[in-house]
Image (tube, grey):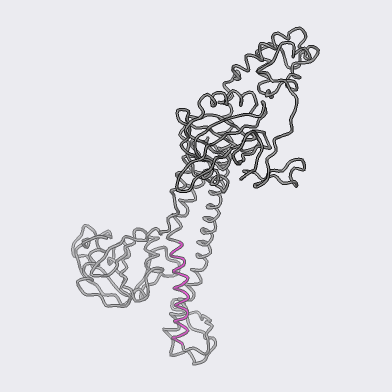
Amino acid sequence: MEGLFLSHLLEQLSARVPTSTRGWVFPSETSAALFLEEMGFLVLDYAPPTPALYFSRDKLQGEPRNPFQRFLASKVQGNLTLAEQLKLDRVVTLHFSGARGFIDSPATRLLFEVTGRNANLLILEAGEGFSGKILMAAREITSSRNRFRTVRSGGLYTPPPPYEKLDPRALQESDLQVLQEQPLVKARDLLDGIGPTLLSELSRRSGIGLSEVVGDRIPQVHQAVKSLVKDPSVAQGSLSEQAREASQAEQADALRKTLREALQKRLKVLSEQLQDVHRAEVGIQTAATERAWADLLMAYQHQVPEGASEVELPDFETGEPVQITLKPDQKVWQNADRMYARARKREDVYLRLMEREPQLLQEQQHLQSTLSQVQQAELPELKRLENVLGTETPDKGAVQVGGRYRVGGFDVLVGRNSTENELLTHRIGKSMDHWFHAQGYPGSHVLVRSGGKELPFDVVLKVAALAAFYSKARNSGNVPVDYTRIKHVWRPRGAGKGQVHYTQQKTVYVDPALPEPVV
């Protein structure tokens, strides 16, 4: 941002002051925008190394994002009464009248150092010129960072050291004679307010290359300087447009970084949660072993010596001996209950995580896709993504396993595939819950969460009709349906998902039907 362009912008602004203001918005952590009547937003982008001051007709918005911006919004109020520049240096001061209200705001000055990597925005007490007490600075500069100049809240502001250059606004042709034996690039050392961009434009307008000696073309240089004073724009477009583009690029980079970090943080959490699922899959195998041991203890409890620390019992299916470790100070049934409890805990953890796994995977895929968009998006799309991500919250609910019904006050779950059949029968169902299946037909496992209670016969008939409906016998009549307790249902060794054997069943004959109402 070059001094001559700042001068041109302040001329436009000064033609309208004093002018009413309508408050501040903060598009980013390092930019502030003041809404001016009939002029739109005056944007102060104070992010080094490319600070900028420009007008914008865009609909800017944003709440204060840090303590400095909150202080700015509360203290710098009232009409804009004066805008001035230190010579043609990149230092601008805006004077504000203050405002009356529930708490009055006194007059203040806002000083903007549009100076590359040293860019800063400071709030000063009311006064004249470019010095005074600093109320707050966007960037505190201590002696450890700059031994020549400090900037701190509560201290006194000192302008940059003066320098001697020619003011192009009052330039005479004779002032340029020193360039006669010099290349045009030396004009930057001679003329105030002209930096690399305007120097290139000066070369274009004068028709002299930057490395060419000026010679007798002083009049051409003088006319080119005068035209720059009148219209400091460049071939590619106005400096205002360039400043706006540079500012938006800085905002986009900052917002891209913020969104990328938030997405990567959430993806890391999802990865850890998916790792929990894999660990729970290992735990479910342990749960199956503990449940099998407990079943053996309950079946052969009269053969277990009291106070034994271990016992060897025959496997139900193979008859091979199974070594079971016991707590000798507990009775057999207490050891079995302890194993059942541990198994249930592992199974419950697995079930909760397994139910969430599809959701976690879907969210992971969505966030990875969004992260890819963020890497490529420009500022408008980044702002849209910021708004979308701000309203999105991870869904804590789990994906339900099985179709859900309510029959006679009991919850009824229906497996919709072999995986859900497996989960309902061997993971979700408790030993005293009831289990239904159409006899001799492929179909759903139906679980009634009876919790050990006996089912009224009308409930048995309705659930049996539901099991028949979700079987290959759906279009038949008088379908036989078996039901028993979950503890009498097991999966044979080597059988596939959903394949079971069961005993102690009862059979009813029903016509397939859905219960009312479905929930």
Q: For this view, does 321 lie left or right of residue 125?
A: left
The residue positioned 72% from the left and 14% from the top of the image is 209
Q: For this view, does 158 lie left or right of residue 24?
A: right
Q: How many marks?
A: 0
Q: Is residue 339 magenta?
A: yes
Percent of width and height locating residue 438:
27, 65
Camera-nearest residue between 151 and 31: 151
Quarter residue 351 falls in = bottom left
Against 261, residue 338 (above or below) is below
Q: Is residue 399 magenta?
A: no
Camera-nearest residue between 235 and 444: 235
Percent of width and height locating residue 17:
51, 28
Percent of width and height locating residue 276:
52, 62
Magenta residues, start to end: 332-353
Camera-nearest residue between 14 and 324: 14
Against 353, residue 211 (above or below) is above
Camera-nearest residue between 519 and 329: 519
Q: Residue at the top extreme?
A: 216
Q: For this view, does 423 lie left or right of residue 166?
A: left
Q: Residue at the bottom extreme?
A: 306
The residue positioned 55% from the left and 43% from the top of the image is 72
Q: Main secondary structure of the magenta part?
A: helix
Q: For this view, does 333 lie left or right of residue 187?
A: left
Percent of width and height locating residue 353:
46, 62
The residue positioned 52% from the left and 33% from the top of the image is 80
